[in-house]
Structures are given as structure tokens and as C-alpha cells.
Amino acid sequence: MPVKTLGSLMGKRLRTGGLVSVLALMAAVPALGQETRDCRLVDGVLPDGCATAGEGQAVQDPVTSNVELEEFPGSPKGFSISVDGETLAGEDRKVIAGAASPGGALREQDLALDAADVQVRYDGTRAERRLNVLTSDLRTEFSAGEEVSFNASTSYERWIDRAELRITPVRRGFGRPETIVVPMDPNGSASWTVPAGDENDFTYVLRVYDSAGRYDETAPEFIGRRERLSNRI
């Protein structure tokens, strides 16, 4: 019976281990002479011979039922183009393309309002700015010593910090006349007494200020002082 020495056993193990290492290296490294391909995108396009993962695979999802609240009242074409929903004698509604026009009461109401030249519109974001002041009795002539009452109104009071009535004599010639300032509420009233003197005509405006001191004012209105009053109403 042959005797296995320690040296022979170690040589066998080394030969076996070397074979395993060579096989592992061959599996990890591509075969010699095999060309590797660069499949990175070039300007967003794959090079020829490259493919993305999952290419050629089709994904199918089940088709569910229609979940719309109501069906389109026309044909399966799915659209209808008509002119004001007009109806021709003995024919369907005037249709340019698609299915027959479903018409409806709302369209008939729109046409009736348009024929009557009536516009029905509501836009809460389009509030018009309004600022007014006039004499309470709408008179334009007063006598000396008479008290005149003014009424003011505005649509943007919440942005107004203070308001005043400004009355200025109409002076002919040189010199700047002195303006009389009467504090008043932007949606209130104020009084002023017509003075005696050389000035017979006056202008008045309502001026309003915001918290930053910026102001807005009405166009000037005229009042006059007369000895004989003829335009009382």
C-alpha cells in the first residue's frame, strides 16, 4: 500500500486551489477578444445595437367601465359644432360638424337676452371705485350767511383714513385764494356757512386720504352766492 507523504498531500491541495482560482477569475473577467459596448445615451438616443431594460415587453391593464356622471347626449362622435342651435324647417339643427346639437333651455335664454340687449353678469372682484359729494338739496346758489349742507359717499371707505371737504373761492386776477377745509366722514355730511365778501363763486371737492397720506378727490363742483335766489328745488 503506497504511503502518502505530507508533501504529496500539500501539492495536491495547491493544485486543486489553483484550479478553483483560475475558474473564478475566468467567470469574473469577460472572455478575451469579446468587445464591450457603451450603451450610454447620446443626445437622448441609444446607440445602435443597444436596448433598454424591458424593451419589447407589453403591459396590459384591464379596461374599467365609464365613470362619467352622464352620457353625452349626441352620437358616438363625441362632439357637436352648431350655430346658435338654430333649427331648420323639416331638418335637424344646423350642424357644422359632429353630432346633432343637443340644444337646451340655457342656450335659448342666452339668445333671448342677447336679442333684448340685456347683459346678466356678476363679478364680485370687479368693484368700481366711487367717490361723490354734493349739496344735500342739490342747489348751486346760496345767499350770504346761509348754511350749506354737503353729503358725501364712497365705495371704498375701509381704505380711507380721513376725509375733508375743501372749498376754494374762485378769484379772478393774481394771488392764490385760501382754501377752507371742513373735516367730514367719507359717507357722512358736513355744513358750511356762505361768507359775505368779494368772492361770489366757490368750488368744492371731497378729498380722502389713506394711512400713508396718499389722497384721492372728486372733480370740482361749483356753488355761487347770489342776492336773489331763483333755482331752489
Image (spheres, grey):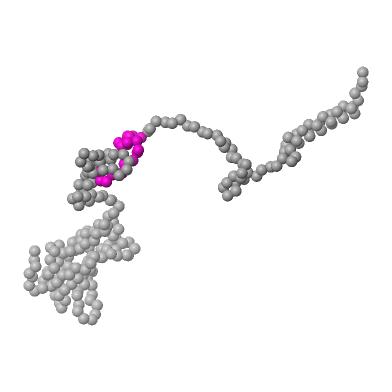
Tell which of 37 and 159 is nearer to you: 37
Residue at point 61%, 44% (across, down): 48
Task: Using the rendered view, name the quadrant where residue 27 is placed.
Answer: top right
- In the rendered image, the quadrant that contains the N terminus is top right
Q: Is residue 87 visible?
A: yes
Q: Is residue 157 visible?
A: no
- In the rendered image, the quadrant that contains the C terminus is bottom left
Horizontal and vertical percent position of residue 84 = 25, 46
Tell which of 155 and 55 is nearer to you: 55
Residue at point 20%, 77% (across, down): 171
Q: Is residue 118 left or right of residue 16?
A: left
Task: Using the rendered view, name the quadrant where residue 204 is placed.
Answer: bottom left
- 90 in magenta: no
Q: Residue furthest top?
A: 1
Q: Residue furthest front?
A: 90
Q: Which residues are magenta?
A: 68-85
